[in-house]
Amino acid sequence: MKTFNNASVQTLWNNFVKANPEHKNYNRPEAWYFCDNQTDADTCVSLVVQGVKQATSTSLWWFKTYGYAFPNVGDLNIVTNWNGEAKAIIKTIKIEHVPYNKISANYAKLEGEGDKSLAYWQKVHWAYYTREMAVKGDQPSQNMIIICEQFKTIFTI
C-alpha cells in the first residue's frame, strides 16, 4: 500500500479538524488510494466522494504478507487519488472476515464498483488478488479470507 504525507493530505485533515474539533487531539490517519492502477484508484475515490463506494475488500494474505494491522471499527482513513491528492476521509463502521466464495451480492453492491453485481465484484477482485499475490509467487483460492471493511464517507474536499 502506498501512503502519502503531503500538503494535500495535511490540508484535508486540517479542514476536517476545524469542522470537527472533537478530533483535534487525534493523530492524522494514514492516507492511501484504492487498487493498483490509476484508472481504478481514481474511479474508486470518486465513488467514495459521491457516497457510492461504502466498502473495500482486502485479502487476509495481504495483511499477513506485509505486516499491516487489521482495520478496526472507528478507524479513520484519508483516501487519495492515484497522485496522492486527498479527496475524502472515511470511517470504518463494520469489519467481517469472509471467505472469498461466501461474499454476498449485498456486500458487492456496497463496494459500489461497476454494475454493483456479485459477478462484477468476483471478476475484478479475482483479477486483483491474482496480481497482488503473483508478486510473491502465490495465488488466490476460492476459500481465502477477505477482510470486508464497510465504511462511511465523513468528509470530502
Image: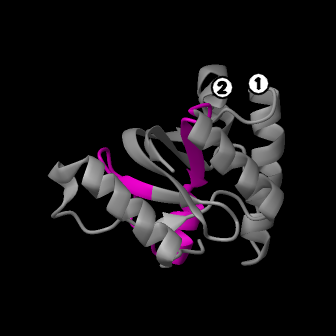
Q: Please state if 139 lies on the left or on the right of 77 as rendered.
A: right
In the rendered image, which quarter is residue 137 located in?
A: bottom right
Q: Nearer the viewer, residue 68 or 86?
A: 86
In the rendered image, which quarter is residue 73 located in?
A: top left
Q: Residue at x 48, y 78 (%)?
A: 5
Q: Is residue 99 visible?
A: no
Q: Please state if 58 lies on the left or on the right of 9 as rendered.
A: right
The image position of residue 49, as x and y in percent, is 58, 42
Q: Residue at x 42, y 57 (%)?
A: 77
Span colored in magenta = 51-77
Q: Is residue 5 visible?
A: yes
Relative to 18, does residue 49 appear above or below in the rendering?
above
Q: Are marks 2 and 1 in contact (CB under 8 Å)?
A: yes
Q: Nearer the viewer, residue 30 or 7?
A: 7
In the rendered image, which quarter contains the N terminus? bottom right
Q: Amino acid at mark 2?
A: Lys
Q: Is residue 35 magenta?
A: no
Identify the mark at residue 109; answer none if there is no mark. 2
Q: Which residue is mark 1?
A: 117
* CA neighbours of label 1 inside 10 A, class few (<14), some (14 to 19), many (20+): some
The image position of residue 142, as x and y in percent, is 72, 44
In the rendered image, which quarter is residue 14 located in?
A: bottom left
Q: Is residue 71 magenta?
A: yes
